């Protein structure tokens, strides 16, 4: 049922309600490739080229729009889509004022904002709120590198000019130093902060994450000093605090196995674990250890805990679902099913990360081909159409179900026909199955493969491919539908072992001219079977004087 919201909280509410009634189709092309079906990529190389080309075109269009904003003044989109309109980058306020400073901050013009701030200080005071915004801007974009520029960067200069410094000012500067690699200076500034009895959770989160990079000795690289100070100052930790602690603990194997479960239990009590939390836990107990029974049990426990959970991104590391691929790499079918069901919950698939991480379906299908019954494999194949066709061919061969090869070939959504090794494997399996009852289907499949190669001149025929196609067509008596002799001439490749069978097919179809051409082709390549072919042709065909 469609639940129409009584009150539209935003302009997309009705569209979101309709979208909630439709399940995601994992076999569909990603949205980014749906603009032009003709150009939709079929191989990994085409995928990369398409993505880079699309991003390049988008950047070029954005540059043109922003360079000529007067040509793009009409907004046709409803609701308004800011990224399709020119960016407002021109400064409108030129006089020295706090409003002009805030305009430069909102437009992220760091140098102009600093210059305006200096001019304002000569005549009047700047509000603390605006100063906070300016410090945030400088520390985020770092107009001068604090590591290389020493004490001369604008963030520290403005900070030192302030008559009063509150927690927000310290927070901006310390987090900026951590972001840009000035860890030692960040801790020095934190000591000054403690003397002033000021602090907040964001400062602790930033410092905790880099403790192992600051302390040189192993016994100093992990201590509870920062956490004890948080407790003394009654600073309430948040999700990023716990995740920062877990991330820092990953570098200390023994300590990590001691403290990580305690931290996780406390997070569960607060109801705040995220995907990154479990990634850190598995790094401690699973990745860095041998995959023995106890470590596999940890992986099982994590997946059981996550079962049926719909996640939202709460931590910058949440999209890194590395543990999903570890589950599939361990050849455990039960884990594979749990992983797939987890990805299918809500919109968890959006957290898979980059295109490599999104290769989950192919890896899951490869696991099915290795571990599952062939009938179950085929059901999954029709559902998710992954890229693991080679494993599917091996599974069909193992279960003696080569009669399904023509059906599999018809599903070419992901460009299997572009992969020469897969095509040759397919032809080889069909040619080997000489007792199959579906020789007609095999021949039709072989003709389809030939038409694919004929339509792509750059595709290079191998001798084995020509031989296999010839065998399949001979068995089904369909040589007349494909001019194989001409193909042999064009490609300068002749399967000599098959020429006798070709001659027999010419006799069955009463084609003396083809038989003569066959003998001439064999002679042109100086094949040892030429005398025998010539003798048979004279004996089995009625030839005219010209022939």
Image: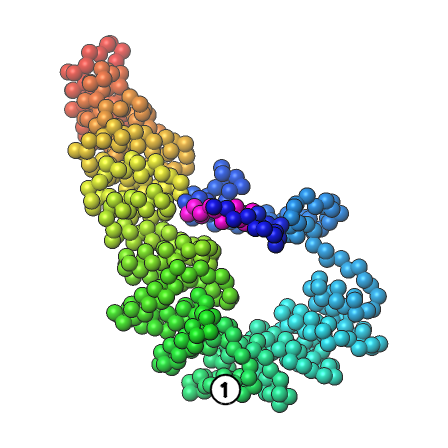
Image location of residue 118, percent across then percent down: 78, 74
Image-based side of 233 in relation to 125, left or right? left
Image location of residue 527, percent across then percent down: 22, 30
**How busy is the neighbourhood of tag 1: few (under 14 within 10 Å), some, or many (20 plus)?**
few
Q: Residue at x 19, y 36 (%)?
A: 433
Q: Is residue 279 above or below residue 483?
A: below
Q: Is residue 515 above or below residue 455?
A: above
As drawn, the residue found furthest toward the bottom would be 195
Residue 14 visible, this angle: yes
Which residue matches tag 1? 228
Name the image quarter holding residue 131. Answer: bottom right
Q: Nearer the viewer, residue 533 or 248?
A: 248
Q: Nearer the viewer, residue 427 or 169?
A: 169
- The quarter in which the C terminus is drawn is top left
Q: Residue at x 28, y 42 (%)?
A: 425
Is 18 within the magenta?
yes
Q: Which residues are magenta?
A: 15-26
Q: Nearer the viewer, residue 131 or 546?
A: 131
Q: Residue at x 44, y 65 (%)?
A: 275
Image location of residue 431, percent across then percent down: 22, 35
Image location of residue 325, percent across then percent down: 36, 60
């Amino acid at each position: 049922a469609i639940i129409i919201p009584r009150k539209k909280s935003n302009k997309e509410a009705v569209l979101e309600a309709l979208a909630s009634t439709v399940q995601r189709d994992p076999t569909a092309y990603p949205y980014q490739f749906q603009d032009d079906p003709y150009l939709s990529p079929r191989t990994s190389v085409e995928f990369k080229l398409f993505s880079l080309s699309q991003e390049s075109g988008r950047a070029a269009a954005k540059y043109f729009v922003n360079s000529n904003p007067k040509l793009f003044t009409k907004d046709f989109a409803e609701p308004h889509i800011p990224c399709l309109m020119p960016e407002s980058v021109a400064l409108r306020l030129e006089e020295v004022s706090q409003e002009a400073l805030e305009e430069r901050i909102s437009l992220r013009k760091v140098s102009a904002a600093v210059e305006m701030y200096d001019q304002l200080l000569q005549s009047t005071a700047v509000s603390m709120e605006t100063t906070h915004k300016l410090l945030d801007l400088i520390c985020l974009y770092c107009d001068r590198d604090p590591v290389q520029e020493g004490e001369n960067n604008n963030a520290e200069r403005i900070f030192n000019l302030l008559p009063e410094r509150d927690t927000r000012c310290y927070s901006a500067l310390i987090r900026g130093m951590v972001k840009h690699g000035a860890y030692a200076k960040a801790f020095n500034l934190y000591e000054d902060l403690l003397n002033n009895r000021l602090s907040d959770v964001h400062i602790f989160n930033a410092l905790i994450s880099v403790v192992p990079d600051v302390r040189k000795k192993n016994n100093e690289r992990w201590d509870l000093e920062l956490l004890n100070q948080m407790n003394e100052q009654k600073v309430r930790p948040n999700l990023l605090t716990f995740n920062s602690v877990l991330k820092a603990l990953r570098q200390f194997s023994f300590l990590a196995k001691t403290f990580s479960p305690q931290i996780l239990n406390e997070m569960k009590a607060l109801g705040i674990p995220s995907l990154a939390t479990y990634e850190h836990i598995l790094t401690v107990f699973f990745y860095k250890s041998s995959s023995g029974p106890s470590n596999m049990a940890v992986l099982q426990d994590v997946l059981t805990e996550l079962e049926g959970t719909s996640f939202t991104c709460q931590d910058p590391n949440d999209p890194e679902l590395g543990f999903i691929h570890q589950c599939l790499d361990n050849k455990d079918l039960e884990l594979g099913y749990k992983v797939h069901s987890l990805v299918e919950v809500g919109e968890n698939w959006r957290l898979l990360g980059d295109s490599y991480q999104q290769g989950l379906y192919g890896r899951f299908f490869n696991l099915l081909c290795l571990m599952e019954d062939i009938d179950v494999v085929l059901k999954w194949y029709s559902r998710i159409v992954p890229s693991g066709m080679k494993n599917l061919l091996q599974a069909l061969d193992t279960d003696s179900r080569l009669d399904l090869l023509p059906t599999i070939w018809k599903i070419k959504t992901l460009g299997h026909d572009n992969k020469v090794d897969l095509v040759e494997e397919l032809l080889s399996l069909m040619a080997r199955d000489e007792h199959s009852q579906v020789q007609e289907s095999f021949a039709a499949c072989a003709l389809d493969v030939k038409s694919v190669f004929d339509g792509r001149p750059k595709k290079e025929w191998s001798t084995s491919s020509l031989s296999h196609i010839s065998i399949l067509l001979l068995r089904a008596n369909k040589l007349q539908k494909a001019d194989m002799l001409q193909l042999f001439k064009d490609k300068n490749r002749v399967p000599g072992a098959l020429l006798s069978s070709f001659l027999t097919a010419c006799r069955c179809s009463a084609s003396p001219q083809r038989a003569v051409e066959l003998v001439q082709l064999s002679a042109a390549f100086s094949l040892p079977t030429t005398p025998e072919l010539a003798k048979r042709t004279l004996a089995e065909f009625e030839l005219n004087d010209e022939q």
